[in-house]
Image: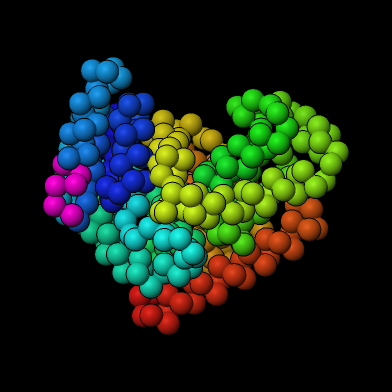
Amino acid sequence: MAKVTVVGAGNVGATCANVLATREVCSELVLLDIKEGVSEGKILDIFQTATLMDFDTNMVGVTNDYAATAGSDVVVITSGMPRKPGMTREELIGVNAGIVKTVAENILKHSPKAIILIVSNPMDPMTYLALKATGLPKNQVFGMGGALDSARFKCYLSKALGVNSNDVDGMVIGGHGDTTMIPLVSKASVKGVPVTELCKDKAVLDKVVADTMVGGATLTKLLGTSAWYAPGAAAAMVVESIVRDQKKIVPSCVYLEGEYGQQDICIGVPTVIGRNGAEKVVEVALTAEEKEAFEKSAEAVRKTNAILKEINVL
């Protein structure tokens, strides 16, 4: 079985660790945080549910001790400041860039073969930064955004159509931002039936798209901070696909070299996720409208990436 490290014991990191532990995705789980006692306390809390939930995962919480992460097969980086109400993911870049770069470099020292999954926001530039800073192969460093956005898309579709959410299939590509993500209505279905056949009212589907795009901001407004249950579970799902070599097709933020007409950028596209990380980009046919939206999304991500150079972290 695998060893998995989650860096950042905030709400998202702790939720991810909890899901990984209870689902017994790995045999060894490390939760690391910079704040004294937080990781230790949350791991102890999770461990106290073991007899209630019937799981046997070996767990440890540590304070800034990267030696404890040595030999990790997968590392999830959730470190950074969460979004505050009214704050965009892009505004976080100056704060979180230094944190993510430092964490990635520390992980590399102790686990050079680890698959690194970036969750920290703004996720697209943070993934690009981690990939460039570590110099690792592109399959080894990628970001989790599309898994979460797609889950939200399917949730809103199920509510709008009045169907079981587990019967809904759909995905979101593009940047992991309120204005850059692209829910693919053309590819969404319920038990193989296109949603456009089940719902002839375009206004209903347009609202689903709009609700999906502001899904994170909606929760931030309600909660006063970033959401954590779905983001943590989405990250754990991606880790499970890696550890168990499930080969799931998950929209993920990966480095493109010509796919979808893009070069030198990390952005969300359908990707086969297996034991070797982001194993293969799946190119699907997009409508003219979706292609245009993807190009605009890529342009916006590039502008955010440019800030990395302006602040001298890249």
Q: Where is residue 208 in the image (x, y as percent from the top left)?
A: 69, 45
Residue 196 is covered by the magenta coloring: no
Image: 23 above or below 310: above
Viewer-side residue, 115 vs 191: 191
Q: Do we see residue 133 in this rendering?
A: no
Please report the bounds of the magenta region as a residue range. Answer: 35-40
Q: Classify 163 as above or below 98.
A: above
- Quarter holding the C terminus is bottom left
Q: Where is residue 120 in the image (x, y as percent from the top left)?
A: 39, 56
Examine the rendering and report whether any part of residue 241 can be seen.
Answer: yes
Relative height, residue 72 to residue 254 (above, below): above
Quarter of the image for the N terminus: give it: top left
Q: In this view, does 257 lie to the left or right of 245?
A: right
Q: What's the colour scheme?
A: rainbow
* Residue at horizontal 81 percent and vertical 32 percent from the top: 198
313 sits left or right of 221 in the view: left
Picture residue at 30% right of the left edge, 30% below the top:
21
* Residue positioned most to the bottom: 310
Where is residue 272 drawn, in percent x and y? 54, 41
Q: Position of residue 61 (x, y in %)?
A: 18, 41
Toward which corner of the image does residue 259 lie, by quadrant? bottom right
- Image mark count: 0
- Name the residue located 51 percent from the left edge and 72 percent from the top edge: 304
Relative placement, left or right, of 255 versus 114 is right
Q: Residue at x 44, y 49 (%)?
A: 223
